[in-house]
Image: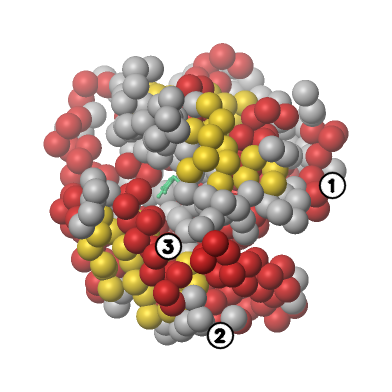
């Protein structure tokens, strides 16, 4: 097992040139797609160190995205559980209301430097689709977003947002007509168009170089939060935590703290419980396998087919997890824990009623764990990545939980 002292050179050494984090990651592609991913990888390695690229990305972060986002001390919420102080990194205040734009603007800028004219992506719940459509509008590029017909039906507001932003939403009509088929369709389109287009993945996963690229673009979260927290308090937080779907907001938060004396917690969705199909807690119940061109922990059957997964948060219901998380788990540097639907919803209403912030249901999972931590520790501090705002969730929440009466939150 490793501890924080083993992580001084981590970012230079992981992933290696083939995209491996220890035994996880890599790039498993059909022969025809290899040149496209190789081109993206070479271009990223060359461009990401140029001063011009870095300066332009900095300007975009500041003037378009509204960064830096603040760190906020939840004094009233903290007081409920003793003397442990809960702090939030407010990614909900990033333009478009979540962290996903951090890597989409990076991917769009890379496309511009590579001379590409189009961004191709898949989307499940539509959050990644909206972020990539936003980036395409900013850079004046075409944008094709592949989306299963079933998801188009379910996620109507996000479909409208993408279209308003000028993107083409391409319905995927084969198989189960959801995210997995949308990924296949986006890969097919990339194969046909990679002279003109770049593929933009939605999280820190997929074949090399995407896990590394997305982690690097998202690490603005942790770099800012670390500096802000030190400035506010003069010390490190005792712990940081974030929710883990594919793993992008969490890696963005965690990587700048890996070499610090800070405990790190990744929070996965336990949904309705531990039975197959009732959760998406890959680290608790998964085994090593291969999906969408990379190796990591997966929820899979004995033939390697992904199992059905579920979470109340649509952004967390993925049967795999980014390969870097699999490495950090086995190295013992990050602790993986869970929060159930009910725990997340109680945290959601607590933040609404005690702090005046409506969080995304995804982010409420991270907060639910922070509350558990505060109750157990009674002192110290925990810094939570609040990955997004909850405006997208209020219709669903109201239909199923009203305004939170059942949680008896009394202030
Ligand atoms: C998509 C999403 C997530 C999950 O994705 P990660 O790649 O694990 O960060 C979490 N929170 C919000 C608000 C999201 O939109």
| Residue at numbered disc 3 | 187
Secondary structure at badge 1 equals loop
All told, the count of numbered labels is 3
Residue 289 appears at what percent x and percent y? 53, 34
Q: In which quadrant will I find the N terminus?
A: top right
Looking at the image, which residue is at 26% across and 20% down?
A: 408
The reply to whether residue 295 is visible in this rendering is yes
Question: Is 315 placed left or right of 82 in the picture?
Answer: left
Mark 1 or 2, which is nearer the eye?
Answer: 2
Q: In which quadrant will I find the C terminus?
A: top left
Residue 268 appears at what percent x and percent y? 47, 30
Q: CA distance from mark 3 to mark 2?
A: 20 Å
Secondary structure at badge 2 equals loop
Residue 149 appears at what percent x and percent y? 19, 55
Secondary structure at badge 3 equals helix
| Residue at numbered disc 1 | 9
Looking at the image, which residue is at 16% across and 53% down?
A: 153
Looking at the image, which residue is at 79% across and 28% down?
A: 2
Q: Quadrant of residue 319?
A: top left
Mark 1 or 3, which is nearer the eye?
Answer: 3
């Amino acid at each position: 097992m490793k501890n924080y002292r083993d992580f001084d050179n981590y970012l230079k050494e992981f992933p290696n040139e083939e995209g491996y984090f220890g035994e996880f990651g890599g790039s498993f592609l059909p022969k025809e797609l290899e040149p496209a991913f190789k081109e993206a990888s070479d271009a990223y390695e060359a461009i990401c160190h140029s001063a011009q690229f870095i300066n332009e990305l900095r300007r975009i972060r500041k003037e378009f995205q509204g960064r830096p986002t603040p760190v906020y001390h939840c004094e009233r919420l903290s007081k409920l559980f003793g003397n442990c102080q809960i702090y939030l990194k407010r990614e909900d205040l990033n333009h478009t209301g979540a962290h996903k734009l951090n890597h989409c603007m990076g991917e769009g800028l890379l496309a511009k430097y590579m001379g590409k004219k189009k961004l191709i992506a898949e989307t499940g719940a539509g959050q990644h689709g909206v972020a990539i459509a936003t980036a395409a509008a900013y850079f004046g590029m075409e944008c094709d977003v592949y989306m299963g017909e079933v998801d188009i039906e379910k996620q109507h507001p996000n479909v409208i947002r993408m279209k308003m932003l000028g993107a083409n939403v391409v319905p995927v009509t084969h198989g189960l007509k959801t995210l997995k088929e949308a990924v296949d369709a986006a890969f097919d389109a990339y194969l046909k168009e990679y002279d003109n287009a770049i593929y933009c993945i939605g999280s820190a996963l997929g074949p090399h170089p995407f896990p590394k690229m997305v982690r690097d673009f998202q690490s603005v979260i942790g770099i800012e939060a670390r500096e802000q927290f030190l400035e506010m308090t003069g010390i490190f937080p005792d712990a940081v935590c974030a929710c883990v779907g594919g793993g992008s907001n969490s890696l963005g938060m965690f990587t700048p703290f890996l070499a610090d004396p800070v405990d790190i917690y990744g929070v996965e969705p336990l949904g309705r419980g531990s039975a197959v199909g009732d959760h998406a807690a890959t680290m608790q119940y998964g085994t090593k396998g291969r999906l969408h061109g990379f190796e990591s922990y997966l929820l899979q059957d004995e033939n390697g087919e992904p199992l059905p997964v579920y979470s109340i948060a649509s952004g967390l219901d993925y049967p795999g997890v980014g390969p870097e998380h699999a490495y950090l788990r086995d190295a013992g540097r990050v602790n993986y824990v869970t929060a159930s639907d009910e725990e997340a919803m109680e945290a959601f209403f607590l933040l609404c009623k005690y702090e005046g912030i409506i969080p995304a249901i995804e982010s409420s999972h991270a907060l639910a764990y922070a509350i558990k931590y505060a109750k157990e520790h009674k002192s110290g501090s925990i810094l939570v990545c609040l990955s997004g705002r909850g405006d997208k969730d209020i219709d669903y929440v109201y239909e199923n939980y009203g305004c939170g009466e059942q949680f008896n939150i009394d202030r």
